């Protein structure tokens, strides 16, 4: 009799345990969504824009720009990379896209070193053997797979390539990162526009002051 009552009590305790587990799961999910919304909204604040502007000025001060240099695209790329790194620093590496931007420079450095070693090794082998191999054009496997994918998956893969660090991520992660990345880029445009207006205003005022100072007196 006691064994039967103990067995009958087990489903009740299991159901109560499942309910409490669901409640704890919902409570743990709710703050994360609130934190995500707060993270998206922080890019619209004036304080965050000022923080990014200070980091942007520090990053641009380290970029070497020469007005007489013919490599204007390279200088523009350097400015863009500095602005993106300042944006990733402002995000404090809490998002996937910011971590990808911060680590991209290190990966590029190792890639260049590896490419240099490969070129040196290929040149030494060609000089030793006296033959040179002609490279055949390779067709990318991802490109062939992309043609056979449905339209929705192709758009998701394109969006994943646009957001740093989201090339091979699932759709919920891509959407979350894209939302935060777009808000950060909008703040970046506002900060850089304000900085450009400030610099143009200061240069015009200094030019007007120098012209008035050099004008002859009657």
Image (cartoon, rainbow, N blue to C red):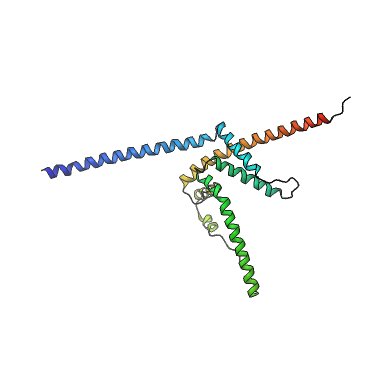
> Which quadrant of the view contains residue 50?
top right
- Image location (x, y in percent) of residue 112: 60, 57
At 61% from the left and 40% from the top, the residue drawn is: 56
Q: Quadrant of the N terminus?
A: top left
Residue at (26% x, 39% y) in the render: 16
Q: Quadrant of the C terminus?
A: top right
- Residue 59, given in percent of the width and then of the height, sits at 62, 42
Visible in this render: residue 133? no
Q: Is residue 120 left or right of residue 66?
A: left
Q: Confirm whether residue 160 shows in the render.
A: yes
Q: Residue at x 64, y 74 (%)?
A: 128
Q: Residue furthest top?
A: 218
In depth, the one of 210 and 204 nearer the eye is 210
Q: x%, y% of residue 117?
A: 60, 63
As rendered, which of 181 and 124 lies closer to the eye? 124
Q: How many marks?
A: 0
- Percent position of residue 158, x then y: 54, 49
Does residue 96 sit above or below 193 in this rendering? Answer: below
The image quadrant of residue 123 is bottom right
Of residues 130 and 205, the one drawn nearer to the viewer in this rendering: 205
Depicted 84 relative to depicted 136: above or below: above
Farthest residue to the left: give it: 1
**Farthest bottom residue in view:** 129
């Amino acid at each position: 009799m006691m064994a039967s009552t103990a067995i009958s009590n087990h489903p009740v305790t299991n159901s109560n345990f499942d309910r409490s587990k669901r409640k704890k799961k919902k409570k743990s999910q709710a703050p994360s969504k609130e934190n995500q919304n707060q993270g998206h909204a922080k890019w619209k604040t004036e304080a965050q824009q000022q923080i990014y502007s200070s980091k942007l000025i520090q990053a641009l001060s380290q970029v070497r720009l020469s007005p007489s240099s013919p490599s204007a695209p390279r200088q523009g790329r350097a400015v863009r990379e500095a602005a993106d790194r300042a944006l990733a620093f402002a995000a404090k590496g809490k998002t996937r896209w910011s971590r990808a931007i911060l680590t991209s420079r290190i990966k590029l450095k190792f890639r260049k070193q590896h490419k240099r070693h490969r070129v040196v090794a290929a040149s030494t082998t060609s000089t030793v053997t006296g033959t040179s191999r002609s490279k055949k054009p390779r067709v990318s496997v991802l490109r062939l797979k992309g043609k056979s994918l449905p339209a929705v998956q192709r758009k998701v893969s394109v969006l994943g390539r646009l957001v740093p660090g989201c090339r091979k991520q699932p759709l919920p992660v891509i959407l979350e990162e894209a939302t935060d990345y777009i808000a950060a880029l909008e703040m970046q445009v506002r900060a850089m526009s304000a900085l450009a207006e400030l610099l143009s205003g200061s240069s015009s005022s200094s030019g007007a002051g120098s012209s008035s100072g050099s004008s002859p007196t009657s």
